[in-house]
Image: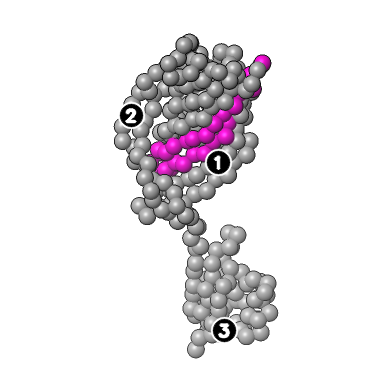
Amino acid sequence: MRKLTFTAVVVAALAAASIAVAHGIEGAKTAKSVAATFAATAGSTTTRTCTTAEGKVITVTTGKYTGTASGDPDLTGAITISARSTINTTDGVGVVDGQFRIDVASGRDTVAAFSTVYDHGNIAGLAAGRARDPHLKLLGNISAAFSSSGFASGKLGGGTAGGAAVEIGPGSCKASKPQAEKSEARGTITALSTSSITVAGLTCNIPADMASDVNAKFKVNDRAEIRCALSSGQNTLTKIEKKH
């Protein structure tokens, strides 16, 4: 499965601390500073995890988050955020991208896309979109505390926190798979029933679909080799062979 790898390279302050709303970003005729705070919690999320060849754990989460924004009229109302985070959880860096929609009191919703850098629990980056008046464009810094459960202490303009920088490059990693705990023993069968077997001090549960066959072919004091794997917290028989 193709994923991304990240390397933290430098911490840099964002160039501006407020959002500008203007009639056209190019050759703007009007501009004013606006700001808001926001918070949103996860409604539904999907998470995938894998490990790179370098042993870095990459976690990708997509989700929808809902909450409230408060500030200037164009930035006040219920906020819905759709976001995708790709984070190197081993080093604590990554990116969080997406878009938000604010249901303002009158007019069209304020909407914007954002792209941010994640650094040890915090994001900082840039948001761009439009305010409730379709002729007003929105451009500004965005920052927040972030985890898969939501956004906290969020700011749109108004003194947003500076952010880190990451390098993003192609890479590959394999889905993380838990390693099954296995055990084996060779020696005399000292106990045998329809539900368990003990060989050389190792006791393993016998699966129901193996019970009749094992008890038909083996008995106490026979010599055997058993192989078992941990299943639901119990050593469970996976293979048995007679030994002489």
- Foreground: 109 or 144? 109
Find residue 160 and report its horizontal and vertical position in percent: 44, 20
Residue drawn at 31 percent across, 32 percent down:
10
Left or right of 7 in this view: 220: right
The CA distance from mark 2 to mark 1 is: 26 Å
The CA distance from mark 3 to mark 1 is: 57 Å
Question: Mark 2 is on which residue type?
Answer: Val
Between label 2 and label 3, give the one nearer the viewer: 2
Find residue 206 and report its horizontal and vertical position in percent: 63, 72
Q: Is residue 201 visible?
A: no
Residue underneath mark 2: 11
Q: Which mark is residue 62?
A: 1
- Foreground: 139 or 164? 139
Q: Residues within 10 Å of mark 1 (few under 14, many from 20)?
A: some
Residue drawn at 48 percent across, 10 percent down:
30
- Foreground: 185 or 14? 14
Q: Which element is circle 3 on?
A: loop
Q: Is residue 165 visible?
A: yes
Position above or below: 155 against 242: above
Question: What secondary structure characterizes most of the magenta part?
Answer: strand
The CA distance from mark 2 to mark 3 is: 69 Å
Q: Which mark is residue 221?
A: 3
The stretch in magenta equals 81-106
Q: Residue furthest front?
A: 27
Q: Which element is circle 2 on?
A: strand
Find residue 145 and report its horizontal and vertical position in percent: 48, 28
Position above or below: 149 against 189: above
The earlier-in-sequence mark between 3 and 1 is 1
